Image: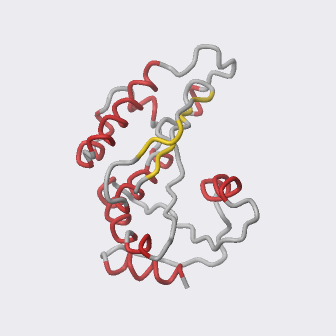
Amino acid sequence: MLAAEAAALLRTAGLEVELDAQRPLDHGAWVPLRYLAPAAAIPVVQLSLPRPRTPELLLAAGRALAPLRQSGVLILGSGGIVHNLRRLDWEDASGPQPWALAFQDWVQERLAAWDLEGLAGWRQAPGAAESVPTSEHLDPLFVAMGAAGGPPEAVFEGWQLGSLSLASYRFS
């Protein structure tokens, strides 16, 4: 069972794990899967973000899960680099906000340089407070980076409502 294998890998890395077969899929899982696998014919194991959490803990979780990639498991980190619902521009007339662009550019520069330590200090980046008022949408990026072998390739860039980045990356 894939969930048990993932749990064993996380425990071996010294991380606490609790399996919950009754928890329904979060929108962070079913929304992308709705487009990636609309027939729902693939097994899915959802991992919840730990509490408390740090970028270092999330990177460690990703590193622990990295061996699953060798057996064909897709590790999907679903979230958003810039995700501020309080600052939505419902008219969407002005495009992305300057603070949002500044933060996303900062993240993209560090991703391209594979500067994991720099990314872990994201709270000091320009526009961070406005772009990431709570970290649960950014945190999956750290798990994906931990599981990856190197910098990602950008596969999509776009914005919605001025403060929602649609940037998507593929890690090799």
Which image quadrant: the C terminus?
bottom left
Relative image position of residue 102 (x, y in whole percent)? 39, 24
Q: Residue at x 56, y 37 (%)?
A: 166
Based on the displayed image, in which of its 4 quarters is residue 33 positioned?
bottom right
Relative image position of residue 157 (x, y in whole percent)? 52, 34
Q: Is residue 170 above or below residue 149?
A: above
Q: Residue at x 65, y 56 (%)?
A: 36
Q: Residue furthest right?
A: 39
Based on the displayed image, in which of its 4 quarters is residue 101 positioned?
top left
Q: Is residue 47 above or below residue 80?
A: below
Q: Residue at x 57, y 18 (%)?
A: 95
Left/right placement of residue 158 relative to residue 27 reads left
Q: What color scheme is it?
A: secondary structure
Relative image position of residue 116 (x, y in whole percent)? 27, 49
Q: Residue furthest top?
A: 94
Q: Is residue 84 above or below residue 59?
A: above
